[in-house]
Image (tube, rainbow, N blue to C red):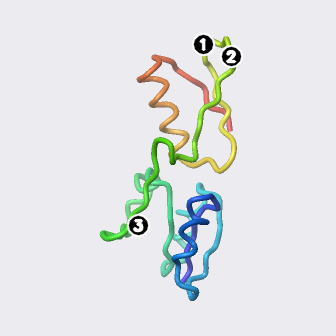
Amino acid sequence: MKLFTPNNIFVSILKNHIPTDVDVIYKPSSLISKELEFNTQAIAMIPSLDLIKNRNLFVASKYAVSFDGLLSNSYFYFIDGQNKIEKIHLQGDVSINEFILSKIIFEEKYSSQIELIL
């Protein structure tokens, strides 16, 4: 069986508990859901918001992994003295989660319409 997953610290920890007969394949988060279209017998760890555009994916009822707060692998870094934020540059393993949630957070918390740059 194939397991498609992002290559991050959390998966590295979980990998020790994955059976050896499972073929772990690392992909960027944004490409994992697409992989499942061609590998229908595979399993994957996908960004949760990918389920919005991939409603045909089967979601396990017994297993799920979610990270937030201090365990999140997404962070905002600010420049000292900057009072207004108009653009955010997203870097690294960017998925739809980082894109959509950044827009929502800055609009609701800071009343700011930001431009996201990949």
Number of residues whose C-alpha sits closer than 10 Å to that of mark 1, classed few (under 14), some (14–19) or many (20 or more): few
Q: Residue at label 2? A: 80
What secondary structure is marked by label 1? loop
Q: Residue at label 1? A: 84
- Quick check: 54 left or right of 99? left
Q: Nearer the viewer, mark 1 or mark 3?
A: 1
Q: Do the residues labelled 3 and 2 touch (CB within 8 Å)?
A: no
Q: Are marks 1 and 2 in contact (CB under 8 Å)?
A: no
Which of the two residues, 35 or 11, is positioned nearer the viewer here?
11
Which residue is located at x 65 percent, y 64 percent?
27
Dot 2 amino acid type: Asp
Number of residues whose C-alpha sits closer than 10 Å to that of mark 3, classed few (under 14), some (14–19) or many (20 or more): some
What secondary structure is marked by label 3? loop
Q: Residue at label 3? A: 57
Number of residues whose C-alpha sits closer than 10 Å to that of mark 2, classed few (under 14), some (14–19) or many (20 or more): few
Dot 3 amino acid type: Leu
x, y (%) of residue 72?
52, 46
Dot 1 amino acid type: Lys
Q: Quadrant of the C terminus?
A: top right
x, y (%) of residue 116?
62, 31
What secondary structure is marked by label 2? loop
Which of the two residues, 73 or 28, is positioned nearer the viewer here?
73
For residue 96, the mark is none
Label 3 to label 2: alpha-carbon separation: 43 Å
- Quick check: 96 left or right of 78? left
Mark sitting earlier along the chain (3/2) = 3
